[in-house]
Image (cartoon, rainbow, N blue to C red):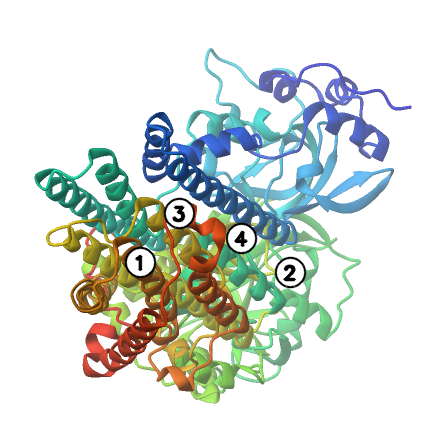
Amino acid sequence: MARTVRSAPLHIERWVEQPIGALLAALRTTPEGLTQRQAAARRRRHGPNRLGAPPGVSLARRIVARLLDPLVAVLVVASAIAALTGDTISFGVVAVVVVFSVALDLVQEHRAGRAVEALQRSVALRVRAWRDGRCAELPAEQLVPGDVVELSAGNLVPADGRLLSAADFFVNQATLTGEAWPVEKRTVDAPNALSGDTPDLLATQQAVFQGSSVVSGSARLLVCATGATTELGRIAGTLAEEPPPTAFERGTRRFGLLLTRATIAMVLFVLLVNTLYQKPLLESFLFAVALAVGLTPELLPMIVSVTLARGAVRLSRQRVIVKRLSAVQDLGAMNVLCTDKTGTLTEAALRVEQLLGPDGRTSPRVFELAWLNAHFETGLKAALDDAIIAHGSVDASPWRKLDEVPFDFERRRVSVLLESQSERLLIVKGAPEDVLRLSVAVDTGNHAAEPLDAARRAAVARLFDEASAQGLRLLAVASRRITDGTVDVSAADEHDLVFAGFVAFTDPPKRSTAAALASLQAHGVALKVVTGDNEAVTRHLCGALGLPVAGVLTGTQIAAMDDLALRAGVTRANLFCRVTPEQKNRIVRALQANGQVVGYLGDGINDAPPLHSADVGISVDAAVDVAKQAADLVLLDHDLAVLRDGVREGRRTLLNVNKYVRMATSSNFGNMASMAAAALFLPFLPMRPVQILLNNLLYDVSELAIPTDRVDDADLLAPQRWDITAIRNFMLGFGLLSSAFDLAAFGLLYLVLQVPVAQFQTAWFVESMATQVLVIFVIRSARPSWRDRPSGWLAAASLGVVALAVALPYAGWARAFGFVPLPGRVLAALAGLTLAYLAAAEALKFIFPRLSRINAQPSPPPRMGPIT
């Protein structure tokens, strides 16, 4: 039976300083890792490997948090006052409203949270760790101190630890240090590696830390600290801050402020009027509170959560995993998509098409050098390397690797230093512009070289342009003999190269891409291609896909632009070539500064910065860890057609949220304003406070099915944004129409039919329920109501609530709420008024289309400020 580790986690100085042998002994592990039983015992001791995993909030604390909500708190105070004054009916109804609202919110929040957690677990970070003598893949959160993990280019470092072995291992630890440049890590086994009064732990070569990303090379890591005991966990614990609100969250907050102002004004008005008319103070207070509750769409947070969670689940069926719930709405609001071309617009099935020497003829020497470079490279492997290896083979037995300068996105090349019995050779392959810039001669065959003069440079440039125009992707290959006994090389040694030629690749466009691009454009999404490839190759691909090129910006041009110039440039251009990761990020920020909602689709290490900056970062299941970690959405199929479906789902989600907002604000505002106005001329309250609360409770029930509703296909063709101006106009326009019919109902009941007070209040309850619930069938769509059927659940919920409201006065127990049966003439009058109101609302959609437009969404003003 494996013993549970009972000692506290090793302090960072101890595991960084100790010799590896002593450290392995202290952690009771071996270079082959732990057994499953040992790992399970340690996991019980140390807990999951999660950063600042918040403890589960108890049910009691969640209930208290909701009771402290201002509106709920007002209800609680009102019910307490009613109980103290002996009004048990009011106390009971208010208590039911509070309990029902809180319970419904908790249940729906729990269900939505469970659904999203399940989706996120499907794309959780996974690592390759040694267990029971075998290297197996497992979730990163299962790591414990003593585990041994294999790392390679593109991985995120899952925990803090020491290197057992490393080969050309470079990591980016900007998350911890702020330093953007990769640093090399080596296996340094020195007891006194740290010295001085304030040693820089993060700068030690033999240790790597959670949150870093592997840029190149490979390594074997001994895990020494996990979860909150890591350096990143310690920092996260001391600097934990709420993330900035998304555009969707900012919109809901502005909407909440709009309703709060309207509610406060109405409550004060009602209290003032009732006080002047010397009406009972307690009843007036409860009436004002009931108006406040009736005006406020208290189910909005729950409707938003349920609708977004439902959208996330539906996206999962289309093989799109949602990591951030509000990203569903952001996807629907997206009107610009930035994407790389390889693997997104193309098949990513690269194959070697030609091997071109400097004179344009086939050159075996080019393939030999390129193959040796790809074969001995241990850093960031690319599809180009795989294509070279798959094209053929070279006898590598005479060669031994001495050192490597890994690929990075600033140099855009990789170099290996090889040694044979007769020579040492530095082989460089990379972007043609950079390799040619460093070359001083050309390989003319048989290991002979001639100067790379102006004429030869012009000939090579023509060869490059001709091949690129044919859609071929070119990789330059060069070499340099080392004669000074050098065994370690760096980027400074990449000079005086002998240019050997080009490896030309083909990467055909995906069959589905052209149709997907046309569909995205039809849905109002502009596509911008952001690539490290050259302009000619990318133009050829765009021509094959039928994508017009409106303008081109290259990395060189972007480097010379300030922020304002780039903002103007990204508006015109839709093709960005030879760009670095930093420039990709600047492009995204410039588009956002112009008021665009930007999505970014990427799968590589160089895509992490723009994925993080974009309004919605999109990656794929096969992406490197750092890209998936930065993304908000993960596509299980690397296909734009899948993304188009995701865009439609995001828009469907926001449209259904908007239906609730339009229905709640217009109907509630109209009904509450009418009751407030009635206080001026009616000698009694148009509805008792308990009746208002019951009205609001039943009304909420009718709206629960809105997330299941259908939407117009035409509405899915335009980006959807949270538009407070359109909501306000809709609330005022349809609310005033509702108030006009409410006042007509007051006059009919009080002046014409002259019904008693109890009948008046009962009739107004029934009429109010019918108008505010049934109007959903009118305002849910811009099309005529009879041509656009709602979902079955919405129809059943709405009609069922109206039927219950009509039948309620005839139930004996309902007399406790002040309800009395209604005579036939009153019911007929109410039915006529309801039909007239629905017809007028239908007409309003077409008479004033700008007022009632479902999709009103003016572009936001440009956001000023720095782009970088």
Which numbered dot is residue 323? 4
Q: Which residue is mark 3?
A: 817
Q: Is residue 587 left or right of residue 712?
A: left
Which numbered dot is residue 759? 1
- Three-letter amino acid code at the position of disc 3: Phe
Where residue 585 sits: x, y (%)?
A: 37, 56
Q: Is residue 735 left or right of residue 92?
A: left
| Dot 2 or dot 3, earlier in sequence | 2
Closest to the observer: 570 or 272? Answer: 272
**Kind of element beneath mark 1:** helix
* Quadrant placement of the N terminus: top right
- Three-letter amino acid code at the position of disc 4: Lys
Picture residue at 35% right of the left edge, 37% below the top: 75
Where residue 704 sits: x, y (%)?
A: 48, 59
Q: Is residue 585 left or right of residue 796?
A: left
Q: Is residue 752 left or right of residue 692?
A: left
Q: Are marks 4 and 1 in contact (CB under 8 Å)?
A: no
Q: CA distance from mark 3 to mark 4?
A: 47 Å
In the image, residue 756 sits, relative to residue 659, either above or below, namely above
In the image, residue 70 sits, relative to residue 525, either above or below, namely above
| Dot 3 or dot 1, earlier in sequence | 1
- Three-letter amino acid code at the position of disc 1: Gln
**Kind of element beneath mark 2:** helix
| Dot 4 or dot 1, earlier in sequence | 4
Which numbered dot is residue 373? 2
